Amino acid sequence: MKIVAVTSCPVGMAHTYMSAAALKKACKKLGYDVRVETQGSMGIRDKLSQEEIDLADIFIDIADVAMMEEERFKNIHTFSTSTSKIIKNAELILEAALDTLNKK
Amino acid sequence: MSKKENFFGDVRKHLMSGVSFMLPVIIIYAFFMVLGQVPGQVGVLFTSISTVAQSLIGTVLAAYIAYSIVGKLALAPTFVVGMLSEQLGMGFIGGIIVGLLMGYIIKLLVAIAGKFKQGQGNDILMSFIIIPVVSTIVGGALVYFLIATPVTNAMDSIYSWLEGMSSGNAILIASILGAMIAFDMGGPVNKVAYTFAIAASTAGLFHVVAPVLVAITIPVLAVGLATVIFKKRYTDDERVTGKSALFMSLFGLTEGAIPFAVVNPFRTIPAFMVGSMVGAALTAALGVVNTTVIPSLIGTIIGSPTIVNTLLYVLCHIVGVAVTITLLILLKEKKSLVVEV
């Protein structure tokens, strides 16, 4: 399972990076391949290339605010959530996300 | 997710995006207001910068709320109508209304434009002339003729109420704001309370600012100190997180307390809320006033010329932190001790 995600919170400092870390931890535990791009106050870090996005199975939209360069994700199955939800229980949200993929 | 499919989209996301872009403007406004205390021409320059930044707060908020709704097309018209509303004295609330209004007007115009033949000619006509001009006329007219007066009246009443507030009410407001700040530690509720304090400060009403700033620092500072003072009650991981919380408390980043709240909200959030409420209420009761809007140690160092009774301000932090630590430890489960074996 290849997962890509973008995190972005209003202040762009705390929740952005905390949710990225939480997601990575959960994916590691469940054995999923994940690449997370953060859009914080210092701009885009670990930017996702179009190739990475096209090869992924699902995109998890963890942006509390408007996302930069959103058009990249036009064609991939998307699951939207918030940084607080991921920080609280990344595994649960991850499973819910993958559920929507299976139900397609 | 159905939220994205309807015309209005995720309104909360649009508002938070606006706030996200607006925050640095507030930081600049606050820093330069303090720096303006420097004597001579330099001080005058800094104060002018602060005043200019202040007039941009509502405008930037509006522009980027609209940007979240429709993208780049939103910027020019909304900056213009936003500045108009600012000059009409509509301030903060004006910023939110204008942002949403312009965003949806432009979204509608884009949808209508989509019905015409696609092509470069039409695109240029639409995006450079028709949409900007039409949206500015419609938005500008609605703001000027319809929205400005009710909004400025409402804001005047809120500000006179704030100004004339009896000391009992001031303590009550401070407590409520304090609780909101600690409730989600940097989340939307926290932002509403902080934004309210900023808005009041731009109108010259500073008595809610100090309580809010105290409330911001208390949870994160308290939990960081708790992991140091009560080492044995916390796991190694928690102590590492506690160190980063201490660092974040220097900058007033309440978010540093979140990892602890996530693990067990019922044993932590009440402690945070009560501590912040007490700190905020005490600040209001003692009449401490802070004219900067920067919390925490950094803010205190920079702002100390403008804090009435710096010592009392610090005292309020100490009391709030002490209350929070006490509650945190009282409520804490013994789990951590077991893990260390």
Image: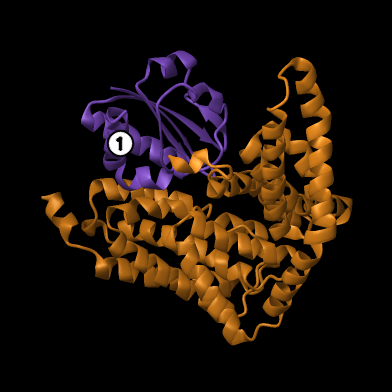
Q: Is residue A71 depicted above or below B207 in this figure?
A: above
**Total marks placed:** 1
Q: Which quadrant does the C terminus of chain A fall into?
A: top left
As displayed, is residue B217 above or below residue B61? below
> Going by the image, does B16 lie left or right of B265?
right
Q: Position of residue B150 (x, y in %)?
A: 77, 67
Q: Please state the horizontal and vertical placement of residue B308, each as a whole percent of the image.
A: 66, 73
| Residue B201: quadrant of the picture | bottom right
**Quadrant of residue A91 within the rendered picture:** top left
Q: Residue furthest left?
A: B341
Residue drawn at the location 46% of the way across and 21% of the way down:
A75
The type of residue carrying mark 1 is Leu
* Apparent side of residue B229 relative to residue B255 in the rendered image (left or right): left
Residue at coordinates 56% horizontally, 66% vertically from top-left?
B212
| Residue A64 appearing in the image | yes
The residue under the point 37% across, 46% down is: A85
Report which colour depicts chain B.
Answer: orange
